Amino acid sequence: MEKFIHEMTRLYAGKEFRVYGHENMFPIHPVMNSEVSDLPTSHKIEGLASFSSKVFMCPQCDTPSYYLADPRGFKPEDFKLRDPWRYIKYAYRARTADESDKKEICERRGVSWSGLNSLPGWLTSINSVVEFMHCVYLCMVKHLTKVILLRSGMLNPIPRNDWYPLDRLEEFFSRIIWPVSVARLPPSVMSSSAKADQWRLHISVLFVGLFVAWEVDGILPDIEAPKSRSGTKDAAAQAKTEKVLHQRHLEILLSESPDPNQEQLDLVDSFTTDWSIRRHYSTMLEFSAAIQILSSRSISPHEVERGCAALSRACQNWANLGVHLTPYFHFAQHFQRQMLQFGPCYATWAFLYERNNGFLGRTNHNNHKGGELECTMMHKWWKWVLVHDLISLGHFAALADSELVT
């Protein structure tokens, strides 16, 4: 990191580069305006407290982690944004502090020193990006499928009524005929692992599959999903989730009423999850629509507002239903500010970086390390780039027509 910051500082001061279409070199001043990575890496690089922190879960606003069980945790119009300069202030204090003071600053102010703070114009809560691919596809869509639908028992059968939603859903996915351009098919509900592009396809058709799975004579029944049998893994997972939700609701109550009465405590104890099939389906439908709008290649500010509003309503509905949600569901509420600042999700998501990482990860290096591995990867990378340029720019066709190629 120190070497990277040193090189970036030199670039900030300006370097001469060749400019396409010009013979002379011109001074260029590159600026780093964002950092794109998954959530744990982002917090570590920027010197922020862990996203599991109760008070500093979100670097952009002061929403505490226990508000993941409350609709207010997903209403961006009511968020109280943090002052980005306070991060700079306490990061520089932590830079020269001893270990005990560093720990106290991190616990009480949610920040530690990061080399990025020395870059001109860098403000953590403004320049950090909620990466769309990890947030939406690898977390929210996966959580919807694996936890909200499957583990929570929303696809449990009713044998006496010959009603088997999970089997219907699996059959629906197996019978879809996908275009040849689809490299990897969407995962089944029971699959153990899947890539982000598979989850992207999955959410595009999930609302149809769930209707097929739940419908009775063409109508969604107004019933609750049957509970999982006691002693099963799903039942144990549901009990654990209810315990977490109960603790979050209790923390919300104590934050608002430090000395609650028995009636308020009983109200918290009586809170249960709503397993209504119709309510869950309408929420999932609005969530799917929001993702389709926000993941568009071309999007207007009005469409950003419309998509973020639908995403906010879906998350608020899940909170009202008593569904366990993760921090990424809250971070997604900042998409509107982010997209208006940095552009559509295509400008910042990590699909390209992950693809290139996979390309380099398949490099044959014969277990060499200590500098040799990096050179081998760089040689492969430049070989691939030069071959691509040779073909795409028409040089190959020019050589084929010349006398050098027979």
Image: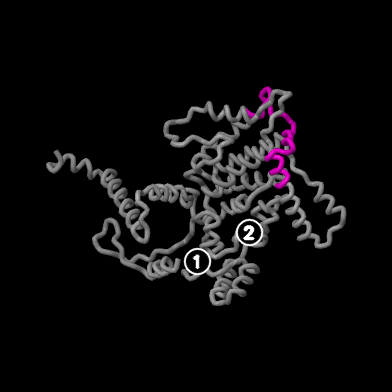
Residue 91, percent across and down?
A: 56, 71
Q: Where, by quadrant of the figure, is residue 237 drawn? A: top right
Towards the viewer: 282 or 156:
156
Local SS, label 2? loop
Residue 223, percent across and down?
A: 74, 32
Q: Estimate how packed mark 1 is, as few (under 14), some (14 to 19) or many (20 or more) residues with alpha carbons within 10 Å.
A: some
The amino acid type, in three-letter code, at marker 1 is Trp
- Residue 197: mark: none
Residue 169, percent across and down?
A: 60, 30
Dot placed on the residue nearer the N-terminal end, 2 or 1 = 2
| x 66%, y 48%: residue | 325
Q: Is residue 10 left or right of residue 228?
A: left
Q: Which residue is mark 2?
A: 57
Q: Which residue is mark 1?
A: 122
| Magenta segment includes 109 | no
Name the quadrant of the C terminus: top left
Name the quadrant of the N terminus: bottom left
Local SS, label 1? loop
Q: Nearer the viewer, mark 2 or mark 1?
A: 2
